[in-house]
Image: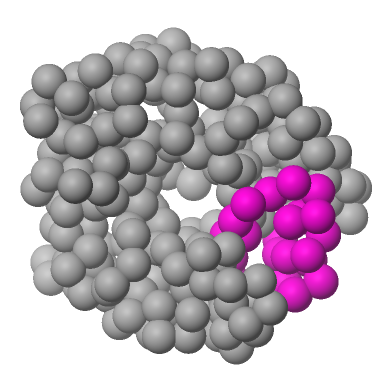
Amino acid sequence: MIAKRVIPCLDVHNGKVTRGVQFGKAEAGELRNVGDPVELALRYNEQGADEMVFFDITATAHGRASMVDVIERAANECFMPLTVGGGIRSVDDMYTMLRAGADKISINSSALANPDLIRAGAEKFGSQCIVVSIDARRVAPDKWEVFSHGGRKATGLDAVEWAKRAVALGAGEIVLNSIDADGTRAGYDLEITRRVSESVGVPVVASGGAGKLEHMAEVLIEGKADAVLAASIFHFGTYTVGDVKRYLAERKVPVRL
């Protein structure tokens, strides 16, 4: 059985890791400074994280240079795969991050604006390098809509249908972010995670809402996710990656210990 992955996520703003709640924005002063991204990456590398996600929320030329520096330093010191996203709008942008040391590229709003970017990236670098991140919000009892621009802009797209289209275009992985659950520590959205997982033939990473060890087991078992992504519970010392893996192993969830 394929091992489930535990993935810390670092939101990077002007070279520092920050954390908000329900997609809190830097311009609104809703972010809390957490620390240096490379120091945190090293900590999680030592704890046994399966991968690390860096998300650039600065989206400026200066921020891009800062993120390249972060990825170069992290790649030199860490031995786990690195994924980077945020502000990547072209194949050239992808190449810049891959050359800096990233193993995967995550695209979100740029894929919505130009779905052909998924295909172009997959053809150039391989589907295994292309991750499509989907920010989904429940808009009706049985409907989840895709939002772009950090959860600010409704697209009218159904989350499951967009996931299926992204995979058809060449995405090798889906990261499903629940806007409703993000940063609340109240648990992942099990229903939409399960629906997407059952609808696509690539790994699905559950994101948004981790607060307890039980939440991670639930989304991997009931939500049928292939991996769990979390930020706050790791950054603020609630749990270590090792805590999560030991808990999952005790419940017969296959993990790399």
Percent coordinates x, y for residue 187 in the rendering: 22, 37
Number of labels in the image equals 0
What residue lies at 65% left-to-right and 28% top-to-bottom? 78
- Relative vertical location of residue 209 with respect to residue 139 in this rendering, above or below: above
Stretch in magenta = 87-110
In the rendered image, which quarter contains the C terminus?
Answer: top left
Going by the image, does 153 lie left or right of 156? right
**In this rendering, is residue 115 above or below 135?**
below
Which of 230 and 60 lies nearest the eye of the viewer? Answer: 230
* Front position in the image: 42 or 29: 42
Name which quarter of the figure residue 85 lies in.
bottom right
- In the image, what residue occupies the spot 74% across and 56% down? 98
Which residue lies at the image location 9% right of the left edge and 26% below the top edge? 251
Query: In the rendered image of this protein, does residue 102 appear above or below residue 87?
Result: above
- Whether residue 215 is visible, yes or no, is no
Is-magenta flag for residue 109? Answer: yes
Vertical relation: 248 (above or below) 85 = above
Residue 52 appears left or right of 200: right
Can you give x and y, in whole percent of width and height, for residue 36 in the image? 71, 21
